[in-house]
Amino acid sequence: MESIQQKRILVTAALPYANGHLHLGHLAGAYLPADIYVRYQRLKQRDIVFICGSDEHGVPITITAEKEKTTPKAVVDRYHEANKKAFERFHMSFDSYSRTSLPLHHETAKEFFLDFYNKGILKEKAEKQLYCEKDAMFLADRYVEGTCPNCNNPGARGDQCENCGNWLNQEDLIDPKCKICASTPVLRETKHWYFPLGKYQEQLEVYVEERHKRDGWKDNVLQYCRSWFKDGLQDRAVTRDLTWGVPVPLEGYPNKVLYVWFDAVLGYISSTKEWANRKGNPDDWKRYWQQDDTKYVAFIGKDNVVFHCIVFPAMLMARDGYILPENVPANEFLNFEGQKFSKSRGWGIDLKDFLNEFPDADALRYAIAVNLPEYHDSDFYLRDYQARNNNELASILGNFVNRTLTFVQKNFDNTVPSQTALTDQDNAHLEYLKNAPAEIGNHYEQYRFRDGLLAVMNVARAANKYFNDSAPWKTINDDPERCRTAMHVCLQTVRTLAVLIEPVLPSAALKIWNMLNLKSLHAEQWDRAGIPALSPGHKLGGSKILFTRIEDKEIDRVLEQLEAESRKTESPKNSEVAPVKPQVDIEDFMKVDLRIAKVAACEKVKKSKKLLKISIDLGSEKRTVVAGIAEQYKPEDLIGKNVVIVANLKPAKLMGVESKGMILAAIGENDNPILLMPEKDLSPGSTVR
């Protein structure tokens, strides 16, 4: 990667849709990584602004309003406030959390539209669109559902199929139905304005490759963009036949609004304008959007790649004078207890509900951060959350801080003891502290937040080792001078940790800062975090417990509630067959290495109801795999059985156990897995085709 100097940084996080509550998957996709990055950059004393807000237009909101017999405004008002409050409880540090229903946003979106219109960029097209004669309205996007022409998914929407991810033209849907009355719509002519996305393809290709070379784009983002370029970019409609949204600012276009994909991304700009207005400097937004020495980083989930890497940059290119994202570090999806978050199946947990059960937001931030889906989908397990809180936050980080401060309080009158001659052990530890900020910061600069947090916790582990090796409980009597020096170093380490944990654990960092009786944590400099700064004789505050242990019964209660809620929304057995996924080339299929494996040993994963740790014989080697089948199979019943595994799957950690492969199973009634076992005994390692 090539480095580039920037004076300021602009960070945006995908605007959450004001049509539902935030869940943990949303946090892992865009919001927590963005907040870690921003908090780190602030400690680096960099000029940075963090922008977000609610996406409040579009068909799903009007459909919700119709179902609830209320207005779209009432829907977005409710969810905007609920999600804003949930973000605050989660310690998100937005500089501006705006909303796209504000007049300022409407003005901004109209500005862009009229600029494109006046330049002759937009094209008006007469086209056929589905029209419901019963409801007397054109059916935009989600007002129509049918079978996807690409993958045969029966629940495809009029704009996109969530099963295969393809954008759709609604007239291509098989057996379309009106979402409101379930009648079959007819095709009628209407007119819409289109943005010529293909006109900017060459510029976009150069832009993506240059930014990748300069700032190291993730491979998943890069390949997604290249696949779109390979297929060729097409014109995209920028207007829709609706009444809820930004009205088309032209005469003769009643009941038409700007398409939500066009107006939503402009919410980043209008939100920055609102921030500048609030500061009393209305033009300050231009420094972040229109000056080349600004670095713009857009944090999103992988389902938003096309809008932020292709559509939005093309719009900014067409407008002239705007900077483009330097990087778009999109995360993959976070699953919950081994299954995808699903509103329809009642599976998952909203952020507000989670924090009602477990109020310590830092513990949740940590559990998500150590398991961020940075390069592939990952899973959030409540038992793993409990283990991370108890065994890492409480027993490693919290334990070191507490034992250090309570020892000093008891033996040194709650003041920082003086330091005398340093030993090799002291010097080695202090050198480690000195270098830690640069190592951790390098991970954060490259959007490797899991690696950065691991390095932070390694400092806490090294701190406990230093404390134990110094044995102050002995030297307080045998060698008081040595004890004073060791505790002086331990207190300097506590201060270092307070700064290093702040991007992920802001509340705990502030608690430690107060325990040390220090002021202005946010005025500290990241680069100097590892340099001793506590003066001998400095009076400390009182020691407090940083993290409270979570008991098994608390986790059991939540799991029981989740399973009960999920059962309420279960569909009848075998009522629906899952649609066939999109076709793949034989070359892609042949990349998957399926092998016969013999189960050599099997046991339950501790503190998990669903997971089994299975030792398998592959003929050429022995491996461990983890499978979510503990509720269907007893460990002793599997020993000696042949199973089919994906042998070349990248390793993944589940509940702290590394799984090197995946056992194949069919999904039976109530989503219960049924292992695929050959009817004849085969040699371990045999190929499956």
Image (cartoon, helix red, strand yellow):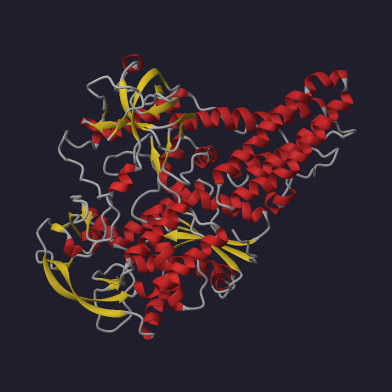
Q: How many marks?
A: 0
Q: Is residue 304 visible?
A: yes
Residue drawn at the location 34% of the way across and 75% of the way down:
196
Residue drawn at the location 77% of the way across and 40% of the way down:
431
Q: Nearer the viewer, residue 267 or 545?
A: 267
The image quadrant where one finds the C terminus is top left
Viewed as shown, does residue 457 lie left or right of 87?
right
The image quadrant where one finds the N terminus is bottom right
Q: Is residue 517 visible?
A: no
Location of residue 241 by image quarter: bottom left
Residue 257 locus on image (x, y percent): 29, 72
Residue 55 locus on image (x, y percent): 39, 61
Residue 505 locus on image (x, y percent): 59, 42
Viewed as shown, does residue 598 lie left or right of 205?
left
Residue 124 locus on image (x, y percent): 26, 80
Viewed as shown, does residue 534 lie left or right of 321?
right
Residue lying at the far top in this picture: please name it: 636
